[in-house]
Structure formats: structure tokens, C-alpha cells
Amino acid sequence: MVSSQCPSTLVICSHRQVHLAAAVFDCGCAGRCRWLDEKLKCLVGRLSREARMRGRVIASESCPNDPEQPKARLADVLAPGLAVVFCGLNPAVSAVRDGHNFSNPSNRFWRALHLAGFTPRLLRADEECDLLRYGCGLTTAVSRATTSASELRAQDYIDAVPELEVKIRTFAPANLAFLGKAAYAAISRRGDVEWGRQPEKFAGAAVWLLPNPSGLNRAFNLPALSERYRELRLQL
């Protein structure tokens, strides 16, 4: 489901270190998936070239979960051809500290995802790469971590568009789900965005707006939050 032949992992660090792990899951490749290895090298090469053109450099291969590596930024969880990539506004300081997306116990992302039917069981934040088994990935609109997303300005989201566009065009998910309205309202320059599927695409992916799962979002309780997420799952 992650790719046309082999459900393996490509995790890209926000600080531009790349971890290639061919045949991480049980794909029958015995750890030697030449097709995947070549495809991922090609994708990483494209991403690296395009990033350098924008003044950003992707470093040599290394694992984002390696304790010897710095964790100044949070890693994306991406692979080619996913059904959906969930795009948070930006990483929480607590998530960067823990090294995993949506790690704060008050954040309801993992519970909403499970209740909506994206995952057959409730995943922990440190099991984030297991999302790839189910055709899902993770990224953020802005890579800079803050204590609260309210610290970001509309211009921060606009400035981050080129980098996000490179990632989405490179990995080509079918759907891109923004968690919260702030990022897409700024990017689309529309103040009247509504929940659900949007009329336009972003970098070739269908766009969805889902409520922010943060525990600070009091407008949606867990059942209401999960129902919004379920609307997307039923369209996959």
C-alpha cells in the first residue's frame, strides 16, 4: 500500500538528514529490495537537488532515531504514493524534545486516527513509522517548533510553501490533510475555508482540512474530532 511493490520506510528529517531503510516491513525481500532502493535513491536525489536550489541542503544518510544524532527538529514520516499525508501546523516543542510526532498525552491525534479507522489499533507516538503500513504519513506546514501554534504568523506558513510543495510533489500522496485551518487559510489566501475536502489541489494532492487534534482545541471533543477524520477515511 505504501508503494506499488514494497511497503518500506523513507523517513526524512527536518534538519535534512535522510534515513533510507529498504524492506523495513515484511515484504519478502529479506532486507534486499533492489527495486525500492533504486526508487528511493531517485526520489532523494530529486528532493536534494530541488532543496539545494532553494538554498537548503540534505545531508548524508543517517537515522533520525539514532541517539547520536541531534534532535533540533522533528522528522517527517513519508514514503512514495501514500493514501494520505497528515500535515500539522508545526511541531510542538514537546514533540521535538521527545523525538516523535504528537507525543504530548493531551494531543488526540493517535486516538482520533484509530477511532476513524485509519489504524487497526491505537498507536503510540514512538510507533509513528507504523503509519506507513496503513498508507499514511506525517509532515508539518512549518518546521520551526513552538510552544503553541498561535506563535506563528500567516507569513510563516506562506514562506514554508516551497519546501512543503517539494515534499508533496516528490512523494506524491493522493491526499494532503491539513490539521487545523490556519496553515491552509494562509496558503490559499482564503479566509473562508471550511472543514472537509477543498476545491483546489496542492502540489498534485487533493486537499482536506481536518480539526487540529491538540488538546487546546476545545471546539471539538474526541467523538466529533474522530468523525471529521472518518469522513476522509471513507473517501480513500
Image: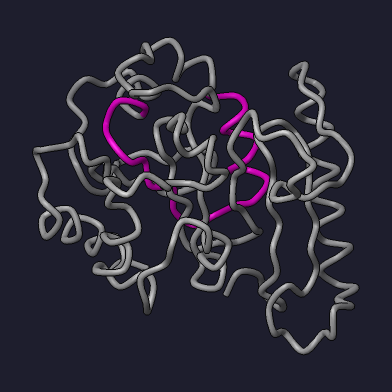
Where is the N terminus found, in terms of image quarters? bottom right
Where is the C terminus found, in terms of image quarters? bottom left
| Residue at image location 53% in from the left, 24% down from the top | 161
The stretch of residues the image draws in magenta is: 161-183
**How far across and down, in percent of the image, does residue 45 sit?**
86, 43
Colour approach in the figure: one colour
| Residue at image location 54% in from the left, 35% down from the top | 96
Q: Left or right: 22 with respect to 143? A: right
Query: Is 53 or 198 nearer to us in this picture?
Result: 53
Q: Is residue 213 above or below residue 54?
A: below
Q: Left or right: 196 with respect to 179? A: left
Query: Is 146 or 141 nearer to us in this picture?
Result: 146
Quarter of the view holding residue 186: top left
Q: Is residue 181 magenta?
A: yes
**How far across and down, in percent of the image, does residue 82 sit?**
55, 61
**How far across and down, in percent of the image, does residue 204 sit?**
53, 45
| Residue at image location 23% in from the left, 64% down from the top | 230
Quarter of the view holding residue 24: bottom right
Q: Is residue 173 magenta?
A: yes
Quarter of the view holding residue 2: bottom right
